[in-house]
Amino acid sequence: MGQGKILFLATVYTHLAAFHIPFMRFFQKQGFEVHTAASSAEGV
């Protein structure tokens, strides 16, 4: 059984892609189920 679930939230997807991918991978390797939520619109 996994450790738990983690949700990363951001205003726009590009923020997640630019800053949080290493953290997401880290938590996945630790056994967490990782989810994200963001708008597909570009930030201004």
Image (cartoon, grey):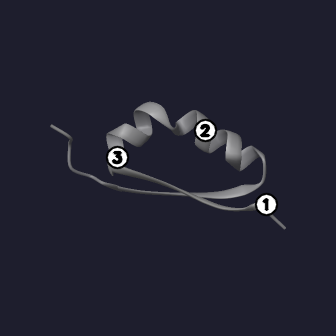
CA separation, marks 2 and 1? Answer: 15 Å
- In the image, which is nearer the foreground, mark 1 or mark 3? 1
Instruction: Estimate how packed mark 2 is, as few (under 14), some (14 to 19) or many (20 or more) residues with alpha carbons within 10 Å.
Output: few
Q: Earlier in the sequence, mark 3 or mark 2?
A: 3
Q: Which mark is residue 13?
A: 3
Farthest-out residue, right: 1
Residue type for callout 3: Tyr
- For the point 69% across and 46% down, the residue is 27
Where is residue 30 drawn, in percent x and y? 78, 47
The one of 4 and 1 positioned closer to us in this rendering:
4
CA separation, marks 1 and 3? Answer: 25 Å
Q: Earlier in the sequence, mark 1 or mark 3?
A: 1
Q: Which mark is residue 3?
A: 1
Where is residue 32 drawn, in percent x and y? 72, 56
In which quadrant is the N terminus drawn? bottom right
Q: Earlier in the sequence, mark 2 or mark 1?
A: 1
Residue 18 lies left or right of residue 24; in this view the side is left
In which quadrant is the C terminus drawn? top left
Secondary structure beneath dot 3 equals helix
Against 3, residue 42 (above or below) is above
Residue 42 lies left or right of residue 31; in this view the side is left
Against 21, residue 7 (above or below) is below
- For the point 20% across and 40% down, the residue is 43
Where is residue 34 drawn, in percent x and y? 61, 56
Residue type for callout 1: Gln
Residue 6 lies left or right of residue 29; in this view the side is left
Q: Which mark is residue 23?
A: 2
- For the point 53% across and 38% down, the residue is 21
Secondary structure beneath dot 2 equals helix
Instruction: Estimate how packed mark 1 is, as few (under 14), some (14 to 19) or many (20 or more) residues with alpha carbons within 10 Å.
Output: few
> Based on the displayed image, in which of its 4 quarters is residue 18 positioned?
top left
